[in-house]
């Protein structure tokens, strides 16, 4: 089938697109913002992935087929204690703020979708296929991330593999797009002075020259907004979104400013309480399991015949208690201020289990379901003096929702790896 | 080489870059797709169609309709780009809805039981922010009209005519 040489009526004709401010310069400004921000999103995303220590144990690995994509992995550090909090605050807040820039960028290049002829050459066909990965991948990553932080799990599978592998598909499209378009972007940015544009009001706004490229309208309409106006518009969108959500990551009295963010509601009500990810009831923890009948089992792999150490909560309270000020930081981007956790050091429990130099520990919860009913912690995480099996927080016993009778708290650890309602610790040498 | 250029339409480096991209995307996709190939492809295609062929035409149509409707209304429209005072708050409010519609429409049913947080405030917060945006915008327009009129009186240097007629 041969396509007509002249485009059919509608968006395939250049005269259909009338915006007097669309053009390579404006697109390149949005492109530059994304060029600087998307790598930050990618790196913070990869760091968050590394924070789960997926290489340490199959228990931690939600993407066992990652192969080469996990080559960069390293043992996640415990210093500084706010590392994961900062990483996720940046990843989520920046991602939300970029929605505005992404929408403006896509608006600015929309005529390209209706290019005529649709496929000029094999090169053009392949490039358009890569753009499908770029745009499809970008929207896929933003939508899965944004739905996940609202706990509306409507995406086609488990969040972790979707968002992780989806990111690599998106980055493949992103890198090739940057490689192919960078010269054009630099040329376009040099074609006009940003300072001059910021001084140009609506009355003096003129379209970019037609020879600048196909994004420039052939028959531009009268402008209704200046280029600086559009930049301010996009920036205001980003700023508004960020200001209405960053409070959930900053915590303290600023939490209430997060009017549109899942964890912007203040739960402290004067009792020093703080945000939680999952209640005991929703994890189906029965009160009978956490009462007087609760026992902590300390196991080890040193001797096959070794008898596990079984402790009551009172036994744990009689051991040396240590207090550490540590935040809870969730992969969803919200976090709490430092809380004063009191309990037994994990390394003391390792010694009690007969493994003074553990290489890892398997922490199991009373939870019966869910991907995070167990987690494996690394040697560095066990040996940190602030890593605790916490029994109390902020001067009182843990509440059921915070993990009573005992929970793990490790500096800079992703929230879901600070296992609540701990049933057993199995140390490996 | 010339034959390759004529057939392919770009340099071999272009081809190599793209093949590298597809190799990486393909490698990731072999792990991504087995989870739920149909669902994920529907999502990827849906993402492009949803934005390019649904969301974008809708907001363009809304923008053009607003301009068409108000242009023919007496009294005569002010000679400032008034459409921006409608377009900006509407778009910002729309973006917030686009991001937070699950919470605003109270869709994640298990959220309160899981987090002890209420789903009630988000709709009201969104409405309040939307109201504030339109109020601010109205105040800005009023200010602009006042200063604009003063400008006209001073030296008839007023704001350029004809704004807000077309995109």
Image (cartoon, rainbow, N blue to C red):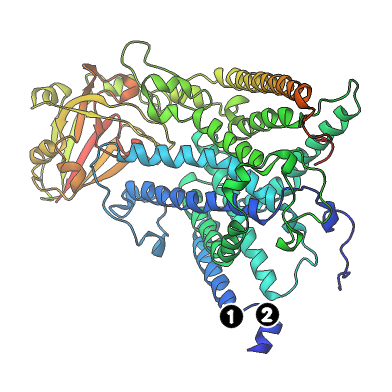
**Badge 1 sits on which subunit?**
B
Find residue A395 and name its label.
Answer: none
Question: Residue B99 placed where, x, y %?
Answer: 59, 34
Query: Is disc 2 surrounded by few (<14), some (14 to 19) or many (20+) residues within 10 Å?
Result: some
Q: In this view, does B32 lie above or below A117?
A: above
Residue that numbered label 1 is attached to = B12
Question: Residue A235 placed where, x, y %?
Answer: 57, 38
Quick check: B12 left or right of B75? left
Quick check: B125 left or right of A90? right
Q: In what element is the residue under mark 2? A: helix
Nearest the viewer among A242 and B153 is B153
Nearest the viewer among A101 and A228 is A228
Which image quadrant for residue A112?
A: bottom right
Q: In this view, does A84 lie above or below A324?
A: below
| Residue at image location 49% in from the left, 27% down from the top | A262
Which image quadrant for residue A292?
A: top left
Quarter containing the N terminus of chain A: bottom right
Question: Residue B164 placed where, x, y %?
Answer: 81, 34
Residue that numbered label 2 is attached to = B8
| Residue at image location 34% in from the left, 50% down from the top | A50
Q: Are marks 2 and 1 in one subunit? A: yes
Q: Do the residues under discs 2 and 1 have CB atoms within 8 angstroms?
A: yes
Q: In this view, does B129 lie above or below A100?
A: above
The reply to whether residue A216 is in sight is yes
**Badge 2 sits on which subunit?**
B
Which image quadrant for residue B135?
A: top right
Q: Which residue appears farthest toward the front when viewing the image?
A: B155
Quick check: A355 left or right of B38? left
Q: In what element is the residue under mark 1? A: helix
Question: Residue A402 placed where, x, y %?
Answer: 32, 24
| Residue at image location 12% in from the left, 36% down from the top | A349
């Amino acid at each position: 089938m041969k396509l007509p040489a002249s485009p059919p009526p509608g968006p395939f004709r250049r005269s259909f697109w009338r915006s007097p401010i669309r053009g390579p310069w404006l697109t390149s400004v949005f492109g530059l913002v994304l060029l600087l921000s998307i790598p930050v999103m990618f790196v913070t995303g990869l760091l968050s992935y590394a924070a789960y220590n997926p290489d340490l144990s199959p228990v931690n690995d939600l993407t066992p087929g990652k192969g080469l994509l996990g080559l960069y992995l390293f043992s996640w550090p415990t210093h500084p204690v706010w590392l994961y909090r900062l990483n996720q605050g940046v990843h989520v807040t920046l991602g939300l703020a970029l929605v505005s820039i992404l929408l403006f960028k896509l608006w600015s290049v929309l005529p390209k979708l209706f290019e005529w002829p649709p496929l000029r050459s094999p090169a053009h066909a392949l490039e358009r296929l890569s753009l499908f990965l770029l745009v499809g991948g970008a929207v896929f990553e933003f939508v899965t991330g944004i739905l996940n932080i609202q706990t509306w799990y409507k995406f086609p599978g488990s969040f972790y593999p979707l968002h992780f592998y989806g990111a690599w598909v998106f980055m493949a499209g992103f890198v090739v797009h940057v490689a192919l378009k960078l010269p054009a972007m630099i040329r376009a940015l040099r074609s006009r002075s940003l300072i001059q544009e910021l001084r140009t009001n609506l009355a003096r706004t003129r379209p970019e020259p037609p020879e600048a490229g196909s994004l420039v309208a052939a028959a531009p309409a009268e402008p209704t907004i200046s280029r600086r106006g559009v930049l301010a518009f996009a920036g205001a969108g980003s700023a508004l979104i960020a200001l209405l959500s960053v409070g959930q990551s900053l915590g303290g009295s600023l939490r209430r400013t997060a009017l549109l963010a899942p964890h912007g509601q203040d739960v402290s009500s004067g009792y020093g309480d703080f945000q939680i990810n999952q209640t005991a009831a929703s994890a189906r923890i029965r009160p009978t399991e956490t009462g007087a009948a609760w026992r902590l089992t300390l196991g080890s792999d040193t001797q096959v015949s070794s008898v596990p150490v079984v402790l009551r909560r009172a036994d744990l309270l009689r051991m040396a208690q240590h207090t550490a000020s540590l935040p809870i930081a969730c992969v969803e981007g919200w976090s709490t201020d430092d809380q004063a956790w009191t309990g037994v050091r994990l390394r003391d429990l390792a010694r009690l289990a007969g493994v003074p130099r553990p290489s890892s520990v398997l922490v199991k919860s009373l939870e019966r379901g869910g991907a995070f009913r167990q987690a494996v912690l690394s040697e560095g995480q066990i040996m940190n003096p602030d890593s605790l099996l916490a029994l109390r927080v902020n001067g009182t016993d843990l509440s059921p929702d915070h993990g009573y009778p005992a929970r793990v708290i490790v500096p800079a650890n992703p929230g879901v790896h600070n296992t609540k309602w701990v049933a057993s610790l199995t140390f490996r040498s | 080489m010339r034959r390759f250029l004529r057939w392919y339409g770009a340099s071999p480096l272009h081809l190599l870059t793209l093949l590298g991209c597809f190799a990486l995307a393909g490698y990731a996709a072999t792990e991504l797709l087995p989870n739920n190939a149909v669902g994920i492809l529907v999502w990827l295609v849906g993402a492009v169609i949803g934005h390019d062929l649904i969301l974008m035409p809708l907001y363009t149509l809304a923008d053009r309709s607003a301009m068409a409707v108000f242009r023919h209304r007496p009294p005569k429209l002010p000679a400032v780009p008034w459409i921006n005072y409608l377009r900006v708050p509407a778009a910002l409010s729309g973006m917030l809805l686009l991001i937070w519609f699950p919470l605003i429409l109270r869709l994640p049913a298990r959220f309160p039981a899981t987090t002890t947080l209420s789903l009630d405030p988000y709709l009201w917060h969104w409405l309040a922010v939307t109201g504030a945006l339109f109020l601010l915008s109205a105040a800005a327009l009023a200010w602009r009209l006042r200063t604009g009129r003063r400008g006209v009186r001073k030296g008839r240097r007023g704001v350029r005519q004809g704004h807000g007629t077309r995109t």
